[in-house]
Image (cartoon, rainbow, N blue to C red):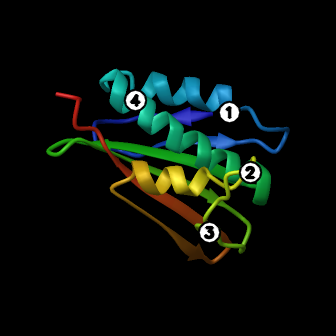
């Protein structure tokens, strides 16, 4: 279930614990961020996919994804909220590992990112610039 609003408002998608469906999440994000230039949209979708995958792999529900597009300069703010108190950590990956690169990609694609504890869990956030979008 999603809600929408005026420009610069937060758009929210409740994540369900019935199993990961990153395809559904990406389609929703594309629909609400469809006016981004393709290059910017691909970067944003990659960050969204990594943060949401971490929710499904490591978090507790309830959980949600929140997005906000801002202008001047163009940025997309991405937030995942979940009920787990365990904070993610950026760790170096080795050439032979098949996992563990998600936050490295988030770090490289984001202008800034971080984690904040909440009364019931945490939020992981990232701000992705969209320089190709007019």
- Location of residue 88 with respect to 36 vertically, above or below: below
Compute the Cα span from label 3 to label 1.
Answer: 20 Å
For disc 2, the neighbor class at 10 Å (few under 14, some 14 to 19, many from 20) is few
For disc 1, the neighbor class at 10 Å (few under 14, some 14 to 19, many from 20) is some
Q: Secondary structure at mark 1?
A: helix
Where's residue 13, x and y in %? Answer: 58, 39
Compute the Cα span from label 2 to label 1.
Answer: 25 Å
Q: Are marks 4 and 3 in contact (CB under 8 Å)?
A: no
Mark earlier in primary sequence (1, 4): 1
Place residue 104 in its image quadrant: bottom right
The residue tagged 4 is 41
Numbered label tally: 4
Marks 2, 3: nearer the viewer: 2
Mark earlier in primary sequence (4, 3): 4
For disc 4, the neighbor class at 10 Å (few under 14, some 14 to 19, many from 20) is many
Numbered label attached to residue 22: 1
Name the residue at 62% across, 70% down: 89
Q: Secondary structure at mark 3?
A: strand
The residue tagged 2 is 96
Q: Are marks 2 and 3 in contact (CB under 8 Å)?
A: no
């Amino acid at each position: 279930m999603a809600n929408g609003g005026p420009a610069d408002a937060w758009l929210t998608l409740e994540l369900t614990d019935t199993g990961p469906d990153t395809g559904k999440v990406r389609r929703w994000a594309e629909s609400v961020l469809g006016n981004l230039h393709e290059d910017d949209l691909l970067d944003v979708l990659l960050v969204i996919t990594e943060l949401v995958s971490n929710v499904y792999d490591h978090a507790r529900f309830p959980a949600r994804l929140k997005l906000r597009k801002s202008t001047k300069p163009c940025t997309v703010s991405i937030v995942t909220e979940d009920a787990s108190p365990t904070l993610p950590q950026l760790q170096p990956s080795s050439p032979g590992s098949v996992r563990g690169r998600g936050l490295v990609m988030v770090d490289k694609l984001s202008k800034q990112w971080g984690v904040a504890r909440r009364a019931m869990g945490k939020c992981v956030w990232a701000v992705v610039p969209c320089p190709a979008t007019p």
